[in-house]
Image (tube, grey):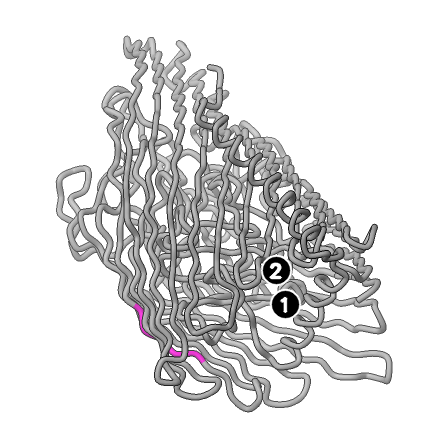
Amino acid sequence: MRHMISSRSHQLGFLLLLGTTALPQLAYAQAAATGAAPSEASAADDANEQASQAQSGEIVVTARRREESLIDVPVAVTALSGAQLEAQGLRDVEDLYGRVPSLFFSVNRQFSSGKDNTFLVVRGVGANPALEPSVGIFIDGIYQPAVGFDTSFLDLERVELLRGPQGALFGRSTEGGALNIITRKPGRDFRASASLRVDDLPSAYASASVSGPVADDLFVGLSVMGYGTHGFIHNRTTDKQQNADSGGTARLAVRYEPSAATTIDFSADGTFKRGTELDGGVPLSFGPESYDVDFDFGGKFRSDNGGASLVVTHDFDDIRLSSLSGYRLVKSDRGSDFDAGAIFVDNIQSINTRQEVLSQEFRLQSTSNNAFGWLVGAYAFSQDDRNFLHTDWATYFGPEPGSADVITTINREGYALFGSVNLTGLAGILDLAAGVRYSHERVKARKYNFLDIPAFGLLIEQDVPRRTSFDDVSPNFQATVHIADDITIYSNIARGFKSGGFERYPTTANPFLPLKPETSWNYEVGTKGRAIDGAVTWALAAYRIDIRNQHVPTIITVPETGLPGTAIASAGKAHTEGVEFETTISPVDGLKLRGNLTYTKAIFDDFIDTTGQQRAGDRIPNVPKWIYSIGADYRAPLSDSVDIVSGVNMRHISTYFSGIGTDADSRRRYPPYTIWDADIGVEFGRFTAGLFVRNLTNKYVILNQGFSVDRGDLLRIVDAPRTFGLRLSYRWGN
């Protein structure tokens, strides 16, 4: 089936082209009119500002699409700098689980336990992955596709996790929150780095970056990363490692400053991954802490993720005009053993996904320090998804082979208009803000089902086109009271919205009808502050989220075959409520203590499952009640030129459940686990060398599990055992 972008995508492409050309021309025109010369200060100013912030302990974030002190933002935000990510060995989104408040993950494992089916969960929202994600990922302000979620943390300025609905300003798929990734931009100073990490699995991870000026107004940066791992799961049938893989990432960044008022940032990146994965899982019958499987098919996968963005900003006195243009194409192919073992030979399931997204955003906002501030903007996008699921039953139904195909094509096109206003300094202590976003999405979809099982006399072919559209208005209201120079209390009310649509892999019995949008209201109060010249910082938030039409994926028994298949139910009402706390304490020079604690109660209020049973009062699957983490970083001089650097971190995930409790989707308990990591090393000059251990106590961690009818056994996706390693790094420039 041929995949084509619609004519509206070409119209959006014209808008993107307009955004890439209009602002630079405007910049040249104003430069000529005012006699402005190309800026020699912008990149240096950025560096000086960051240095000043580091000295004062102030953390600056862009949670409201403008730079603000973290304390002044009436949103629950955790920000980690690039230096913190590197020091703690955090390489991608998965490494953040349990380390920041309320962040967890969920996997729709019926078809794949791979990252194509992994979704972020914040405050219990997004715990049931279906259709679009509930927690969006943005790189430099541009939305990333769901299947491109496993973005590497390569040469970053910082990462911000925004909790609670962010639809008014961030837009798509932010009902639960947003992960905002800001890459490091090239500047006037030459800077380069190289690093190597190896461990005893064995695995190796190497990265390098270089950036600097190539002309007075042009700066270029290049970052690359490559990795390979032997894996830790052994396949008894093939006598090979089951989860061995390798891959790499490269990113080019270009910053051009044609005038003092204009900045143009272009970025292009590509990522590839190849290997085998633990699809199905480790059988419980192999032992309570086994790392063995017995697939007769290796479960190979490959994925490719590439894209480009162009961000142009131009300042007119007290107004800034911004254009954000983005394109991304993500492709994935994976195959798995249908029966997850050697019981039936040559029974293979393969999944092919392709997602292409084109987007354009324009923003106009005030930049003065006046008490009144404002922002208005417009956004448009086109997204094309193609999902292909093929199953070969060579011996599953006896001597006559069977097969099945499910193909869906889903095109989403939409636009949004948004804006916000804020008043600061009312009565000397009060800030008020409000925002709103109107969104319209149109969805066209087609499902093709083919089922051929001669043993049952089944031959079914379906070709069903559908279309639907959705409109939404998402407001937010915020208030902040400055009770002291460095202490605030705030309240935040926001509506969340996740678009409806169609299932990716509907069964033959599925009528392929559209699902309604999922909506929510978030009510939040909190306080933030710092004391003793920044030696102590804290943030405390309490919230309640009321959810309507919650999308709940589940497993059903397909009538034609008796085999499990997926379906998406709709919970009429649900809610989550909880408390988040995080703090840092620096009691003496060189020592920094950090910790966070999350309590989440997530309950169905009105949910009739696929068997007709009322599930009101049941816990929402995949939401731990407690997540907490503590850690310490210590630096001390060994001599005039050598420092010792060390760190320790503990993260705990409490008991949670998967499944909704039906016979086909039984409820499974996940035991709690606690993971300890530690690092120690030395720094002399620009060189760093150190040792690390991950999962110090060698805890056996179950990440996902499901029951195999064919084996009569529980299959478990598990995390890595204790791992020791060595890290080396070197830096040039500032």
The 10 Å Cα crowd at callout 2, few under 14, some 14 to 19, many 20 or more, is some
Residue type at the position of mark 2: Leu
Judge whether residue 409 is colored magenta.
Answer: no
Q: How far apart are the alpha carbons under marks 1 and 2?
A: 8 Å
In this rendered view, identify the residue nearer to me: 639 or 65.
65
Q: In which quarter of the image is residue 111?
A: top left
Majority SS type along the magenta span = strand
Q: Quadrant of residue 240?
A: top right
Spot occupied by residue 103 in the image (x, y as percentages of width and height): 44, 60
Along the polypeptide, which appears first: circle 1 or circle 2?
A: 1
Any part of residue 368 in sight = yes
Q: Name the residue under label 2.
A: 90
> Measured along the vertical axis of the image, is residue 424 above or below residue 206?
below
Q: In the image, is 521 to the left or to the right of 175?
A: left
For mark 1, give the secondary structure. Answer: helix
Q: Do the residues labelled 1 and 2 touch (CB within 8 Å)?
A: yes
User: Where are the magenta residues, as a range?
Assistant: 524-528
- Reading the image, the residue beneath label 1 is 84
Residue type at tag 1 = Gln
Give the x, y percent position of residue 588.
64, 90
Residue in the image at 38% along x and 55% along y: 419
568 or 26, which lies in front?
A: 26
Q: In the drawing, does residue 89 fall left or right of residue 480?
A: right
- Residue 387's mark? none
